Image: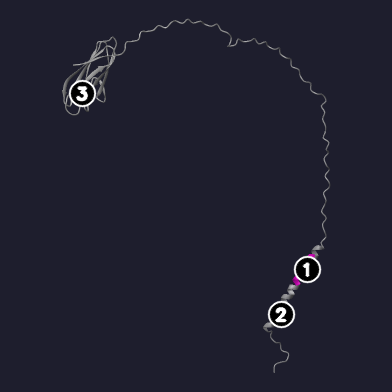
Amino acid sequence: MPPKHSARPLGPAQLVLSAAAAVLVMLVVWVAVRAVGPAEASRQPAVALPVPSAVPAPSSAAPSWTPSTAPTPRRTSASPARSVSPRPTENSARPTETKTTRPATRKAPPPPAGADLAATLNVPASWEQGYVAAVRVRNNGRTAQSFTVTVSNNGMTGARLTGTWNAGGTQSGTTMKFVGGPLQPGATVTFGFQVSKNGGGSARPSGCSVVGGTCGMS
């Protein structure tokens, strides 16, 4: 038979209860220590801090200084004023100069340009579709002059200036104008031109003229 007073092993429930009791004891001890700590700290003696002594206020009265003697101003001798003589102004009266005017002499006007020119128109060749003409111009005056000769081609259908030499030529409608020069007194020049037209019929100029002179046809 087993003995009556043999120790029994602890079960799981008893182990849990033992652990819980140990934890509870530790918690109570920790709370007691926390409660005692602030009380002990409040019992520490207070340390008295030294109070600074009052600083003496500076005196408001500033030291005064009075000069023994005031400086005497120096006197400068005034220089005598200089007399300024008046200067003559630019607007002062000046003697006026009298100018004598002479009557202008009128010169006789020169003779009109081309007043002594003479021109002659000749047609050395002609056909149904055109012609060739030569114009001789002479300066019978006393001064050098340029010339302007006008040739008309009335009744010519489609007349047109196709060539010119020894003079410059222009056309307006069926009228041709030729310019040249200048010609010295007594000099003569001959210029020529060619005119073409449309269709048949006579191909000859109808008239001529020169500025400041006469123009004839032969």
Q: Quadrant of the N terminus?
A: bottom right
Q: CA distance from mark 2 to mark 3?
A: 155 Å
10 Å neighbourhood of mark 1: few (<14), some, or many (≥20)?
A: few
The verdict on residue 36 being magenta is yes
Number of the front mark, 1 or 2 = 1
Please give the name of the residue rendered at 18% of the width and 25% of the height, measured from the top-left corner: 130
- The amino acid beneath tag 3 is Gln
**Residue under numbered circle 1:** 35
Is residue 70 or residue 124 the one in the foreground?
Answer: 124
**Residue under numbered circle 2:** 18
Q: Total of numbered circles in the picture?
A: 3
10 Å neighbourhood of mark 2: few (<14), some, or many (≥20)?
A: few
Q: Is residue 144 above or below residue 199?
A: above
Q: CA distance from mark 1 to mark 2?
A: 26 Å
Q: Is residue 201 above or below residue 105?
A: below
10 Å neighbourhood of mark 3: few (<14), some, or many (≥20)?
A: some
Is residue 127 or residue 38 the one in the foreground?
Answer: 127
Q: Main secondary structure of the magenta part?
A: helix
What is the magenta range? 29-38
**Residue under numbered circle 3:** 194
63 sits to left or right of 94: right
